[in-house]
Image: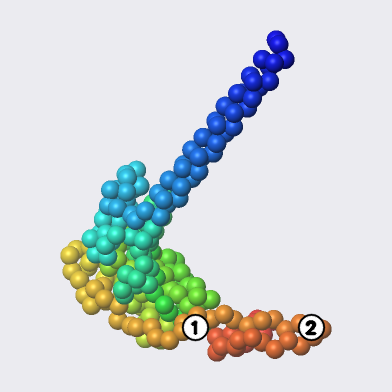
């Protein structure tokens, strides 16, 4: 090929390559922007329905019940739908995964609801014996319960509160839980099932204390009554 013809041909090729790269860059940027926009778009009922289309029936029923009561959720994924500020609860979550639970009667644990609540250290084990689906987050100061319906979550929290306050033993609370659950299944309700019979006030969190160095004394950043109780428990165990 003539050198005079080769130079213009190379120039045209480079221009075309540059144009293609620029076009692809703009397309990639557009795709990224569209993906970002999709992530921040508000949830719609159609979107929730699409996400939960393949979920188990119990989970879908719980989603519909929470939608009807609290409105649209704040976030959704393939595994869970989340609502916030669902008074009297701090947070409500419906999970796709079904966890089989035989107490107080066989059901699926799919609906988790959270309240601000400080559980004393010496009561945590009692709550675990009462109901394995109660979850204590000592650091955040939260108590959560997981069941198939909101009514059973309310019942579990009310009974847990009575155990913490010393108004019921673990055994009596379990008997009451079973009795009330059977009555609810038969169509009977009670104040223990319809609303929370306690309120939480103030800061329920417990950030614990820093461990003191064996070589250098370091003042604790924050101390709480629960932290002091924790120290006593550890000393007694040792």
Above or below — where is 183 with respect to 158? above
> Which quadrant of the view contains residue 50?
top left
Packing grade of label 1 (10 A; few <14, some 14-19, many >=20) is some
The residue carrying mark 2 is 214
- State the quadrant of the N terminus: top right
Residue receiving disc 1? 120
Q: Position of residue 69 (x, y in %)?
A: 24, 64
Quadrant of residue 230 within the rendered picture = bottom right
Relative side of 6 to 196, left or right = right
Instruction: Name the one closer to the observer, 106 or 47.
Output: 47
Whole-percent x, y for residue 126 in the image: 47, 77
- Color style of the picture: rainbow
Secondary structure at badge 1 equals loop
Q: Nearer the viewer, residue 223 or 102?
A: 223
Which residue corresponds to the image point at 41% horizontal and 77% vertical from the top-left? 116
Label 1 – label 2 distance at C-alpha: 28 Å
Q: Position of residue 17 (x, y in %)?
A: 59, 28
Is residue 60 shown above or below 87?
A: above
């Amino acid at each position: 090929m003539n050198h005079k013809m080769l130079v213009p041909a190379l120039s045209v090729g480079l221009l075309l390559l540059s144009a293609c790269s620029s076009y692809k860059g703009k397309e990639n940027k557009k795709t990224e922007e569209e993906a970002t926009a999709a992530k921040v778009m508000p949830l719609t009922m159609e979107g929730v329905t699409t996400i939960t289309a393949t979920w188990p029936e119990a989970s879908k029923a719980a989603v519909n019940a929470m939608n009807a009561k609290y409105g649209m959720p704040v976030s959704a994924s393939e595994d869970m739908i989340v609502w916030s500020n669902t008074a009297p609860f701090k947070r409500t979550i419906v999970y796709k995964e079904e966890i089989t639970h035989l107490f107080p009667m066989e059901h699926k644990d799919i609906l988790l609801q959270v309240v601000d609540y400080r559980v004393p250290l010496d009561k945590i084990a009692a709550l675990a014996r009462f109901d394995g689906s109660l979850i204590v987050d000592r650091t955040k100061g939260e108590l959560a319960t997981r069941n198939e319906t909101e009514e059973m979550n309310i019942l579990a929290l009310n009974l847990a509160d009575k155990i913490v306050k010393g108004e019921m033993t673990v055994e009596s609370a379990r008997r009451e839980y079973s009795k009330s659950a059977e009555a609810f299944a038969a169509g009977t309700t009670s104040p223990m099932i319809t609303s929370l019979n306690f309120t939480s006030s103030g800061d329920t969190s417990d950030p614990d204390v820093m461990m003191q160095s064996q070589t250098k004394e370091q003042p604790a950043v924050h101390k709480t009554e629960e932290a002091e109780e924790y120290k006593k428990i550890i000393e007694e165990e040792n």
